[in-house]
Amino acid sequence: MFKRWWFVGQLRTDRGAGPVRRKGLSREAQHLVIAEWEAAYERLQRIAAERVAAVGDVLREAELPVGDAALDSAARRDYQWALDAFGAAGKVLDEAGDLPDLAAAAVLAERALERFAAVHARLAGAAHPPKPAERCYYNPLHAAAERPHRPEKRSAKRRVRPREAAADRRPGCASCRRAILAGQAPDVLPALIPVRVSRLRKARVLVPYYSVPQKWSLWSLSACGAYGDEWPALVLRGEHRRRSVTSAPAGGARRA
Ligand SMILES: [Zn+2]
């Protein structure tokens, strides 16, 4: 998403995770950060709005027979989950304030459609509808995550190299895995967070979305709603607003 990782230089500290250095947070650097963030926000907002609208069109036209006796309790649950996920996607899109909100709107809308398709497939007689592909942890809007392909039998004896271990730690798309295996940073979805530069001045920096503490972000906890089923209900109850980075004290992000 970003050509340069602004946050790498900006969060670099003289000693481990100590105070943020002022040099990388100059007013000039701030203008560049904000300009790049705004361009990315505009682009992602358009993508998320299009995806939510497209899923809405499909759900409206699909005419699922809700009262049909053919829908067993599991199918009814899945159908309700799909509707909740779609409702949550629209809510997050309307109330978005940062890039991970927009990514979550797109992810929840896509997951609503996947679940809806699974209910339809079961109604059409499929005993086991295909499982949706796992999403890339580094940016859940990337292509589907890839599983490492290693010979099973020799894996016990074969020593896994540190870069392979790093690539296997989280589900990653082919591009992110390639980057990690090459010792480079994957193309991470960033979040904009405030940090305190001095007693009187705050600045904003971009950090990987998953490094925002979970108490300030529902999306760092859930990979933008990609993993787990509890997020639509939490969004509909307003939990995404309670866990907002705007409520975070400056300097609250962990280093990646
Ligand atoms: Zn990726």
Image: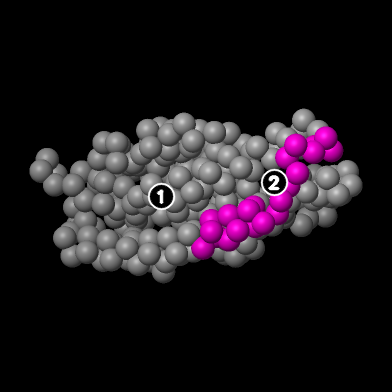
Question: Residue 57 vs residue 104: left or right?
Answer: right
Q: Is residue 178 magenta?
A: no
Q: Is residue 10 above or below residue 95?
A: below
Mark 2: C-beta under 8 Å from nearest atom of ligand 1: no
Asked if residue 248 is positioned above or below residue 142 in the image, the reply reads above
Provide the residue designation for mark 1: 94
At x 18% / y 65%, what residue is drawn?
28
Res. 206 image quadrant: bottom left
Which of 173/88 is in front? 88
Please determine whether, in this image, residue 222 is positioned above or below residue 27: above
Q: Position of residue 165 (x, y in %)?
A: 63, 49
Point out the tag, 1 or 2, that comes first from the N-terminus.
1
* Dot label at residue 206: none
Marks 1/2: CA–CA distance: 22 Å
- Range of the magenta residues? 50-71
Say which element carries label 2.
helix
Eyeballing the image, is 77 above or below 138?
above
Q: Position of residue 65 (x, y in %)?
A: 75, 44
Q: Secondary structure at mark 1?
A: helix
Residue type beneath disc 2: Arg
Within 10 Å of the Cα at label 2, are there few (<14), some (14-19), or many (20+) other Cα atoms?
A: many
Q: Which mark is residue 115?
A: 2
Residue type at mark 1: give it.
Asp
Residue for point 73% across, 47% down = 64
Q: Is residue 38 visible?
A: yes
Q: Residue at x 73, y 40 (%)?
A: 66
Rendering coords of residue 182 (x, y %)? 57, 64
Q: Is residue 52 magenta?
A: yes
